Amino acid sequence: MSLLSAEGLAYVYPGGVPALIDVDFSIERGRRLAILGPNGAGKTTLLLHLNGTLRPSAGRLLLDGAAVGWDRAGLLAWRRRVGLVLQDADDQLFAPTVFEDVSFGPMNLGLPPTEVEARVNEALAALDIADLSARAPHMLSFGQKKRAAIAGAVAMRPEILLLDEPTAGLDTRSARRLLATLEALEAAGTTLVFTTHDVAMAHRFAHDALLFADGRIVARGPAADVLTDAATMDRAGLDAVEG
């Protein structure tokens, strides 16, 4: 059974602008999924649906085969299992220190202080930023902010981690280091789903690929097949990579 799936998902922005059109796909446990497409294709909008930030105009989302609930309790349970990291880390970092920022989610779960502290320290160590715990987020480098934002999601111990353009803006070494960190998170039991414009990285890193264009799925399947198919990639406005 799929861990998280969408059935007939549609979303229309105010003003009648369609953003998602009849989207059907599944996220399989333990398989890295890359979502690719040109700007405006609907990738970020899709991620915002997958953790309940946006509610679809039509269709439904299922977690372990059960339709998710949109009441407060249902959303809280959903977001405990499905974490989201936005492309711009500044949209998620707001507390005076990195430690306080990463602790925000666990504290909202009502966990005892000792458990919150343990989760924060675990997340900071996993992202290799324990030495930055007392630092103000605005004093961090671009890459450090990315790691701090991811640590905030990791502290919730999600089963699925959604990342919007995780390597965007990072130099080659920083991107490679971040991907190694994400691999370690996956080995600890987190399923990774990410959007990207970097076709070569997706080909190297993802198990599966989902191509988007104009709010619709163009293709889905093993990354090694989808991302090397020139005709299919052209339909999504992207260049294929060599197999």
Image (cartoon, rainbow, N blue to C red):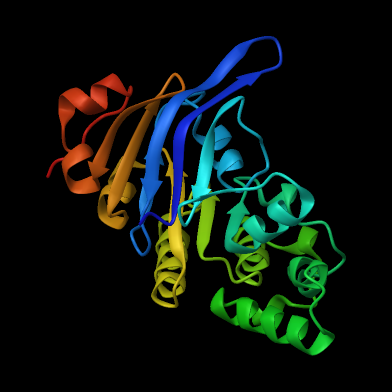
**Residue 165 seen by the camera:** no
**Residue 92 seen by the camera:** yes
Q: State the residue at coordinates (73%, 53%).
A: 92
**Is residue 62 positioned above or below 30 on the image?**
above
Q: State the residue at coordinates (76%, 70%).
A: 98
Tell which of 71 and 32 is nearer to you. Answer: 71
In x, y percent, where is residue 83?
Answer: 60, 58
**Is residue 185 positioned above or below 118 on the image?**
above
In x, y percent, where is residue 3?
Answer: 43, 57
Residue reaching furthest to the bottom = 114
Position of 68 with respect to 117 (left or right) is: left
Say which quadrant the C terminus sits in.
top left
Residue reaching furthest to the right = 96
Q: State the residue at coordinates (46%, 39%).
A: 6
In x, y percent, where is residue 137?
Answer: 77, 62
Say which quadrant the N terminus sits in.
bottom left
Tell which of 72 and 230 is nearer to you. Answer: 72
**Is residue 187 positioned above or below 64 on the image?**
below
Quarter assignment of residue 151: bottom right
